[in-house]
Image (spheres, grey):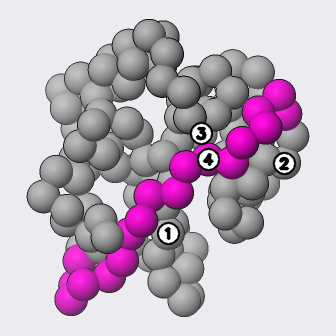
Amino acid sequence: MKLTRRSALRMAIIGAASTLFGTSALAASNQIVKLSKIKVGGTYPFQLSNGAPALLFRTKTGVFAYQTICTHQGGVTQYFATRQLIVCPVHNASFNPFKKGAVVSGPATNPLPIVKVTIKGEWVILA
């Protein structure tokens, strides 16, 4: 993903808002969340150490995560559980989180960036 000035500013604003209002966990120490805090089938928003928003998914078989900045023009995406899609409100690009963040509909052409996570003990951590 090419980082533009607009994307960098958006990430900074999101990071500041998340820090101020506590809307997500900050994954600075590699620990994201205790596994017991996320139900199977659930999601958990968190923030990467560079300020980028990310979303963690828990399934019966494990966990996976994506950076949630649209690969088209840097809009912040939202997950719709009923549709099982991550959608960007800027130009309506959608991504399938259960198929490696693949583009379902454009204008985006690249999948969402994967955030490597794993389970260590009782914690979900950055891998």
Q: Nearer the viewer, mark 3 or mark 4?
A: 4
**Residue 109 position in % (x across, y down):** 79, 38
Residue drawn at x 38%, y 69% is 117
**Residue 19 position in % (x across, y down):** 19, 32
**Residue 24 position in % (x across, y down):** 30, 44
Q: Secondary structure at mark 4?
A: loop
Q: CA distance from mark 4 to mark 1?
A: 12 Å
Q: Residues within 10 Å of mark 2 (few under 14, many from 20)?
A: some
**Residue 68 position in % (x across, y down):** 52, 41
Considering only vertical position in the picture, is 50 above or below 125? above
**Chain-order first, disc 1 or disc 2:** 1
Q: Secondary structure at mark 3?
A: strand
Q: Amino acid at mark 2?
A: Val
Give the label on residue 104, or none.
2
- Where does the N terminus fall, quadrant-wise? top right
Residue drawn at x 48%, y 24% is 3
Q: CA distance from mark 3 to mark 4?
A: 12 Å
Give the label on residue 64, or none.
1
Q: Amino acid at mark 4?
A: Leu
Q: Amino acid at mark 3?
A: Gln
- The residue segment tinted magenta is 106-123
